[in-house]
Image (spheres, rainbow, N blue to C red):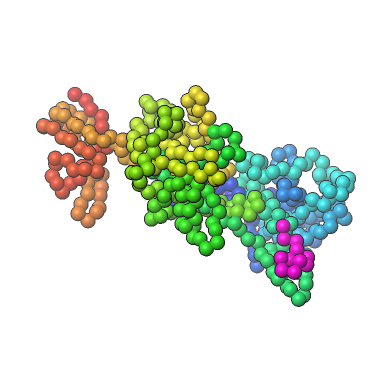
Amino acid sequence: MERQAARLTTETGSTDQAICFSDSGIKRAAEYRTQSSWLLNAFSSPDSLVVPVARNKNLLKDGQPLIIPVCKVDTIRDHLQSCDPIFLGLTTNDDTPVFAIDVADFFSAGGTKPMWLEGTEFVDLRRYGPNMKASEAGLLAYARGMIEWHSQNRFCGHCGMRKVSKDGGHSLKCSSESCNAVVYPRLDPAVIMVIADGDYVLLGRQSKWEPGRYSLLAGFVEIGETFEMAIAREVQEEAGIIVDRSSIRYFASQPWPFPSSLMVGFLASAEKNESSASKISPMRREQVVPIDNSSLSTIRDIDSLPKPAVNDNELEDAQWIHKDFLRAVLSGNSLPPGVKFHVPGKYAIAHYLMEKWIAETRCNNWAGDEIETVQIDEGVFKYVLIRIHDNNGSQKLREDYKKRLEGHLEIKPGGHSQYPKEIDYEAREFDFSG
């Protein structure tokens, strides 16, 4: 069954990368969830499809997701204590109904496997999902999340009576007529954030992770919090860094049904705090310098970074990583001898956010950002890239001047030159001759 992978649009309007698990490849068709007769007929149709799930694992055969016709479920139905199908939606190409069912009871009963189960295995989607088509990984994640929600909510939290499935499996109602409490699938929103200071990003690691693994800081949103409040609290709690709340902006999100999270990604800046400037040891300094100094920009302002104050109950370590080093890690380049450092793979929104931050800083940076002061003595030069501001805040770029300069000119990024005061010159790229 072919599905067109949807593209997730970020706040910049980019659609160049689908985030893993963000596309189920089907139309959810919520209007059919309350139509009991339609659902009954659909699950009885031999053309309908089923995504089987067992113990929070998905079924694969020869490394490919196994999505089976409903008729094959009949071969194991007698071994299932409950066969309440969950309506997932309709295929995009031909409106075929798709359901999820929990088949764990069959394997617990130890029955003889039907032929269609030969050569299959139930696997952890977090491990295999990144190698699937976006639509397949998303569909299996959707099915897994719904089945787990059902398994965790079998009994009423008010009276203890058993719940029954309603609305195509998208609600559960207490079976006691005196209670009739209804629950719906819930999400646990979590924020994950790029916290940047110039060309550096704050990464942390937990003690339970394998050596060298670092990622963006993240945490669940608490009751009564906004996303912005959660970002500021989590970063300060885990790493002792104060976030500039005015800099927080949404970037992208990712479903994470393991069991029921939604990862919401943001970009933000750390507040400047000169009194807590970071003094990075020589070993740490190696991890924030570029790998190839001949081709990458010079690092500066290391000592002005806010110093992380790691909460041992949350993190084992937190440190500032330069974008050039992180770019090399994401590209799979060799690291300096003795340096162990890696980040989550492309399946994770953390990887996506890091890539986007690096691309954004590359676009926004000027070629001479690392140049503190440039002196141009008398001679012939090819060009200077100049940014011109007017009194209204407008600006433009101009490439000047292919001619000889007389005298001496000192140009500082963001400062004024000895040229007319109404123009703000910024020297950014230089190629001298003569």
Visible in this render: residue 56?
Answer: yes
Identify the residue at image location x=49%, y=57%. 227
Query: What residue occupies the far bottom of the structure in this picture?
Result: 178
Residue pictured at 64% horizontal, 47% vertical: 137
Query: Left of 6 or right of it: where is 31?
Result: right
Q: Nearer the viewer, residue 8 or 420?
A: 420
**Front position in the image: 31 or 189:** 189
Q: Is residue 218 left or right of residue 171?
A: left
Foreground residue, 403 or 232? 232
Please tell me which residue lies in front, 238 or 76.
238
The magenta span reads 152-164
The chief SS type of the magenta part is loop
Q: Position of residue 350 (x, y in %)?
A: 52, 44
User: Would residue 419 be found to the left or right of residue 25 on screen?
Assistant: left
Point out residue 187 in the picture as x, y percentages from the top left corner. Answer: 61, 58
Report if residue 237 lies within the magenta region.
Answer: no
At x 36% / y 33%, what residue is drawn? 299
* Residue 430, quarter of picture: top left
Kindly tell me whether residue 15 is visible in this rendering: no
Q: Residue at x 37, y 25 (%)?
A: 294
248 vs 311: above or below: below
